[in-house]
Each structure stands twice: as C-alpha cells, then as structure tokens.
Image (spheres, coloured by chain):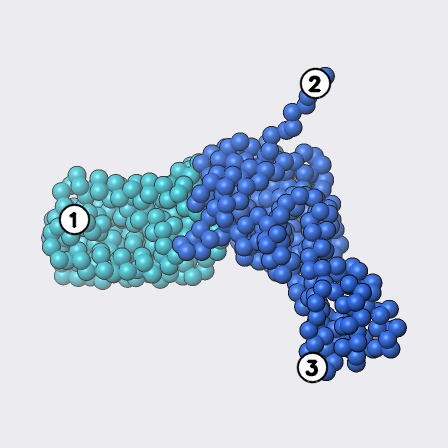
Amino acid sequence: MNPHIYRVVVRSQISTGRLLALAGLSGVAILLAFVARAADDPVEVATRSMGTFGTNIFAPFIALALGSAALGNLVEDRTLVYVWLRPVPRHSVATAAFAAVISVVGPIVVAVMTLAAAITGVGDLLVATATATALAVFAYSGIFLALGLRFKRSLLVGLGYIAIWELLLSRLGDWFARLSVRSYPMSILSDATDVSMRLADRSTLASYVVPLAVGFAGLVYTSWRLSRTEID
Amino acid sequence: MSTQASPPPMVQAAGVSKWFGDLVAVSDVSFSIGAGVTALLGPNGAGKSTLLRMMCGLARPSNGTVTVLGKNPRTDVAVLGRIGMAPQQESLLDYLSGREFVELAAQLHQVGNPVEAARQAIQTVELDPDDTRRLSTYSKGMRQRIKLAQAIVHDPLVIALDEPLTGLDPRQRREMIQLFHRLGDEGKCVIVSSHVLDEVERFGSRVLVIAQGRLAAEGDFREIRNLMDDRPLRISIRTDQPRVLATALLESGAISGCRLEGTDCVVVDTTEPAAFRRAVAPMARDRDASLLELRPLDDDLESVFRYLVGQ
C-alpha cells in the first residue's frame, strides 16, 4: 500500500455533504436504538433495527458515497493521471484507496452502530453488531471502490445495485439471497440473539468468509482495472 | 579512425495507430526523438494529445509500438519514473496546496528529499513555494506552471508537455521556453505539443507536424517553415480596377490564375507568395489602381496543415 496515495484519498473523501450525511444517518441509528430499548421485546426490535438499518442502509450507503468517490472522482475530474503516471504498482494504488475508504467508513459506522447496540441494552448484540457492520463495510467498500473505477456515474450505478440487487432481487429466493451481501452480516446478528430474520440464514462460516471474499474480490478487480484502463 | 555511434532514441514510435471505435485518432505514425526540445505541432484534434498519452503509457496503441528509453511505458511501471508529463486538462487535485501537489509527485517518485525537490521545482516555474493556498484558487497560468513543476520535480529524462504555454502571459511564455531549452540542453528529451505556429517557431527546434492523425512533416523548424511559405496561396484583392490589376499580375507571372468577383474584387492564386507581395503594390501604383484590401483566403493553420498533409 502506498501511504502517500492513502493520505490523498482520505483527504479527498472529506466533504461537508458527506459529513452531514454521516451525521444524519448516525442520528437515525441512535434514535432507532432508543426506540428499541423502549420496545416490549427489545431483543427482537434491536436485532431487526441493527440488521435493517446498520447492515442494509448505513453501511452500504456510506460505503457507496465514499467508496465510489475514492478513485471514481479522480476518473471523473481527469486527475487520475497524477497518481497513475508514477512508478507505483497498480495494486498498491488500489490497496491504498481501499484502505482509505475502510479507514474512514469503518470506524464511523462501526462505532455508531456499536454505540447504538449498547443503547438498546441488549448485551448479546454488542460484539455481533460491531462484527457484522465491520464485515458489511469491508464488502461494500470493495464493491463500490471497483464500481467507482468501472462506471462513469458510479453513484447512480451503486444506488441501482443497492435498490435492485440487495433490496429487491435478494427477496426472490434463496439462490438470489446468497448473492446478497447483506444476508451474511444479518446472519451474524441473528445468530447472536436467536432472532429470526428474512435472509439471515447463512452458515456461521459463510457469514464471516463471504463478506471478506467480496471485499477482496473488489480490491483485486480494482487493481486489474487500474492496470488495464486508459487514462484520460 | 573510430566511428561514434549516434545515441539511441529516447522515444520511439513505430507504425503507431490509435482508434476509438470508428474514429482514427492516430494513423501509422513513426518517429524517433532524442535529447533536446521537440515540438509536436498540429491543429486541435490532430492527434497530438493521443500521441503524448501513448508515449507516457496512459493509452495503449491500437497498432504499432511506442517505447521510451527502450521500454514499453504501458507495461513497465519502472520507466514511468523517468517520465514527467503535464497533461492538457486544467483539472488538478484541488483540495491540495500547490506545494502539497508537487510534493506528492516527488514522494510517489521516491525522490530523496521530496520537500526540497518540490520547493525547487516550484521556484523553477516561478511560483511561491510557501504559498499555502489550495489549487482551487489558482489562476489558469498558475495551474499551468504547477503542472509543469510536478512534471519536473523528479528530474525525469523524458518530459512530455501538452500545450504547456496556454494561459501564460508573454513574459511567462518566454521564461518557460527558456526553461524547455535549458532542460533540453541538459540532455533531456522535452516534447512540447502546440497548435500555435508562432509559438513553435520560438522553440526553434525539431518539429513533428501532426495533421489528421498522420505525421505530415518532420525536421528542423526552418525547413518546415519554408515548406509552409512555399505553398500556393489564394488571395482576395479589393481594388477599384480589378481587371487591370489582374491582367498586370498575370503578365508578370506573380500569379498563376485569377477570378473576378463582383465589380471591385479579384481572387488570385499564387505559388510564389513572396514575389506576389513584392509586385502587387508597385503594379497597382503604376496603373493608378487603389488597393483597398488584400486578404489571404487560406492562411489559417488548418489550411497550412492540409497542404502539408497533401505533400
């Protein structure tokens, strides 16, 4: 990983709009946690809240906003040349960008969701929420980093992916559900509290391995794409 | 007696073509470039930027090969350490300051002391290395110069500059041209693209003329200039006696043909523009004809390039 590229990508990701989006979604997470705490069955409501909001909305949308921009913005404003035209191996550029996305998105999403889990008062959810959101962030960051490099309107493509693939097609049956990233971290939450949720029936091993594999696959594709792409 | 071998070319293109779908941007171009300043001259859209991008490995030739220092810049990442490039686009990493931007280039090129190297490069292009403003606040001229600074910060052997004088004032242009020559004299291969004939004339260098994606001419600028000056010209003359003046010019051999247009205009063709320029005023004076306007009809750069392509 190249530390200089890492720093530049981190700096490029900090914008007022993104910080506001982060703050807004964090506020919703905390609000949902208080609602769950006050519910008749806090374990079930909290598990569903952490799963539905944390792994289905918070993690993918923040990973989309930052992941697609990490290299995508450089492509769109034609400044990738200032990174590409250096004697730096392409996998090192991709790894630095991936690390930048993870290190910005990860701590915020995981910290907010873990705090939310703590607020619900459901002890079993604490570690499970931290783990599930961390894995979701890893997988979605890999996907959206690659999308940012592959597509010109990567934000729209990413929104389409979340809406159509993750939220709609995954409901069509078990085979589709297996191809949905969110089903794996949700399974970790479900395992922790024994609360049954739709899609959350992946094996324990798959729940950990698949999100990691998806994140790495995104990273590998990004490296490959960087070495093949023509720079404007 | 020993024979001294000429140094190997630093940049070499062999039968290079590049097409984007149906659009042929570069067509079967071959050349070799060594140390010194070489101008890539051609109208907008001629394929200069595409050629430069292929030289820097940013684009892959559809056909043929481009080598820089004997290596393929597209696949050999190490050779990129010997190349510096200032692309044509104005966009920069606007959230960085000028110094951070140039330091980043130095760091990625693993320059020993990136801070000092960046400071020197920024001073070389006559910007303030202590300026902490973000690049988003830079004027067009400053952006051009900071692009140049990041291209030279690692002391590259091959420097490709795409329209680097755009947006600079005359004094800055003069300074930059001097800098290009200084770099060329140091043994570096400096390739500068431009669509401005007079600008290239001031480089006083070897020229590759690119037109419609083809190499239209190459050689010393003076030879190219002569070739351009020798081309046939079509000139519109507005006068109160077009018929009389046209007859006199035809008889003198200063023009090869003419066509009357309206009552006060004659369009003439000449293959000897210099002789025509010398003859037209005395002839008009001797015949009491008033010269109201002399207007070249095809003196724009595009027509110059069209002519060269046809040669």
Amino acid type assigned to the residue bearing label 2 in the image? Ser
State whether discs 3 and 1 lie on one chain.
no
Q: Residue shown at 86%/75% (left/top)?
A: B287
In this rendering, the answer to whether B277 lies above or below A121 is below
What is the spatial separation of the Cα atoms under label 2 and label 1, in whole angstroms? Answer: 75 Å
**Chain coloured blue in this rendering:** B
State whether discs 2 and 1 lie on one chain.
no
Name the residue carrying label 3. Answer: B262
In this rendering, the answer to whether A127 lies above or below A75 is above
| Crowding at mark 3 (Cα within 10 Å: few <14, some 14-19, many 20+) | few
Q: Residue shown at 54%/50% (left/top)?
A: B214
Name the residue carrying label 1. Answer: A178
| Crowding at mark 1 (Cα within 10 Å: few <14, some 14-19, many 20+) | some
Where residue A20 sits, quadrant-wise, is bottom left
Q: In which quarter of the image is the N terminus of chain B?
A: top right
In this rendering, the answer to whether B1 lies above or below A19 is above
| Crowding at mark 2 (Cα within 10 Å: few <14, some 14-19, many 20+) | few
Secondary structure state at the residue bearing disc 2 = loop
- Residue A146 is left or right of residue B144, and the answer is left
Secondary structure state at the residue bearing disc 1 = helix
What is the spatial separation of the Cα atoms under label 3 and label 1, in whole angstroms? Answer: 81 Å
Amino acid type assigned to the residue bearing label 1 in the image? Arg
Give the x, y percent position of residue A199. Answer: 14, 53
What is the spatial separation of the Cα atoms under label 3 and label 2, in whole angstroms? Answer: 70 Å
Query: Closer to the camera, B128 or B174?
Result: B174
Name the residue carrying label 2. Answer: B2
Residue B273 appears in view = yes
- Residue A70 is left or right of residue A188, and the answer is right
Which callout, 3 or 1, points to the residue nearer the camera? 3
